[in-house]
Amino acid sequence: MQPQHPQHAPADSLKEPCQQLPKQLRKELRKKLRQHRKSLSTTQLRQAERAILSHCHHAPVFQSAQRIGLYLQSFNEISTTQLMMLLSRRGKQLYLPRILSCTQTLTWVRVSLAQLHQRRFARHVLGMREPYHQRGLPVDRLDVLLMPLVGVDRMGYRMGMGGGFYDRTLALAPCKPFRIGLAHDFQQVPDTLPEPWDQRLDAVLSPEGWQFFAKSRVKAAPRFG
């Protein structure tokens, strides 16, 4: 009688759960961070914005930059309102993202201080506020790009809301602006379990201050002009 050998599952069937595990962990991490962000009070949001602003007054990264991309806070991200006022007073050109429905990428529309005061912006179906005008610049025309995020890890990988707009836009750019993520302190995590298409940041700015990532330290300065 021949001995019975144990039946082994095909290699492909074993590989699938291993691949799904990081995706599930990433989904749970995003959910947890979004819930924490949603729970922030108005007072906490204002304190975070003031702390961020205090680190920007003499930041070298803004001194030579002319075209700066930002965003409008819609989901309890770090607010950029006061920072935009500061940069505008210093003569910087401010640009806000608008989603292009045909490509699901972002174009960057210049806005004035008057527009910011009037708060006349469209509301995208996903909830983000954006400029009405659709004509804008590609991201590679910006000198500095400040980005919202759900999380960022110690390697500089940014976790967004899951739509992929920033990742797609940056992946297609022939050259990239200096990328800064604005983060609440709790949004800095050891590992975001990044996907292959996730774009890294050059720096993150939180209420605690600046952190520059390793790949940026070899650069003499961001590309401006």
Image (tube, grey):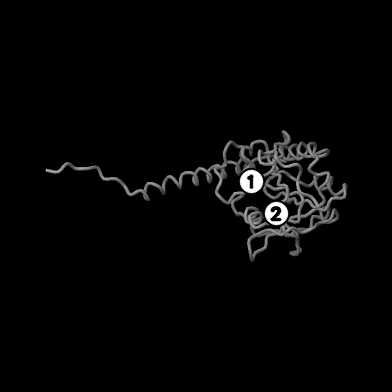
What secondary structure is found at the residue carrying circle 1? loop
Taking 94 as reference, is 101 above or below it? below
* Mark 1 → mark 2, Cα distance in angstroms: 14 Å
Residue 15: give x, y in percent of width and height.
40, 47
For this rendering, which residue is in front, 42 or 205?
A: 205
Kind of element beneath mark 2: loop
Q: Residue furthest left?
A: 1
Q: With 214 as the anchor, is 67 left or right in this view? A: right
- Which residue is the extreme one toward the bottom? 102
Q: Which residue is mark 2?
A: 175
Q: Say which label, 1 or 2, has the lower sequence index.
A: 2
Per the image, the residue denoted by label 1 is 200
- Type of residue at label 1? Arg
Q: Nearer the viewer, mark 1 or mark 2?
A: 2
In the picture, which quadrant includes the N terminus? top left
x, y percentage for residue 62?
A: 80, 44
Does 51 appear above or below 195?
A: above
Give whichever of 200, 204 is nearer the camera. 200
- The 10 Å Cα crowd at callout 1, few under 14, some 14 to 19, many 20 or more, is many
Amino acid tagged 2: Cys
Quarter of the rendering containing residue 52: top right
Q: Position of residue 156 (x, y in %)?
A: 64, 41
Q: Residues within 10 Å of mark 2 (few under 14, many from 20)?
A: few
